[in-house]
Image (cartoon, rainbow, N blue to C red):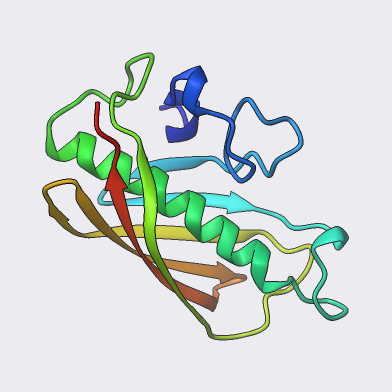
Amino acid sequence: MKAIQDLYPDNLAHCYGCGKNNSQGHQLKTYVEGEETVSRFTPDMKYTAIPGSVYGGLIASLLDCHGTASAAAFACIAEKIDLNQVDLPIRCVTANLNINFKALTPQGEELVIRGKLKAIEGRKISVDMTLTAKGVVCATGEILAIRLKE
């Protein structure tokens, strides 16, 4: 299966965090794995907060992009839309993002972000997320994403 972000139509694929059409961005990719979503990202030294640790802004960006992609995927699944089609018909934006930092996030280690659907209420989609490094929970988050009108 393709990454959710790779299914965004070209006119909606410029996000700094995950846009396939933004060559200078993070290029985050989110995949559906069973009942949850997963993204992986390895931060390099330019994302330093204190030596050896990632700054919180990057973590927020990763959770934001993972959350909106997850929301779009979960909405498609709920509506029985095939995620293998060329363009994803549902796109979401962030209404609210809450983050709890649990531990310093190590530099140079693969970060794994997982999302689980919390609720879908009309155009509002809530997703719970965890960001881990080497099995340690570094941050948790909840996003309220809003489905764009078609």
For residue 48, what is the image quadrant? bottom right
Q: Nearer the viewer, residue 45 or 112?
A: 45
Q: Taking 73 as reference, is 38 above or below it? A: below
Q: Please state if 49 lies on the left or on the right of 117 as rendered.
A: right
* Residue drawn at 11 percent across, 48 percent down: 122
Residue 134 at x, y = what percent? Answer: 62, 71
Q: Taking 125 as reference, is 134 above or below it? A: below
For residue 53, what is the image quadrant? bottom right
Residue 51 at x, y = what percent? Answer: 88, 79
Q: Nearer the viewer, residue 129 or 143?
A: 143
Residue 19 at x, y = what percent? Answer: 58, 34
* Residue drawn at 49 percent across, 56 percent down: 64
Q: Please state if 137 lies on the left or on the right of 83 as rendered.
A: right
Quarter of the figure with the C terminus: top left
Q: Nearer the viewer, residue 44 or 65?
A: 65
* Residue drawn at 76 percent across, 36 percent down: 24
Q: Taking 79 as reference, is 105 above or below it? A: below
Residue 13 at x, y = what percent? Answer: 53, 28
For residue 78, what is the image quadrant? top left
Quarter of the figure with the N terminus: top left
In the current view of this chain or complex, which residue is farthest to the top?
86
Q: Nearer the viewer, residue 123 or 140?
A: 123
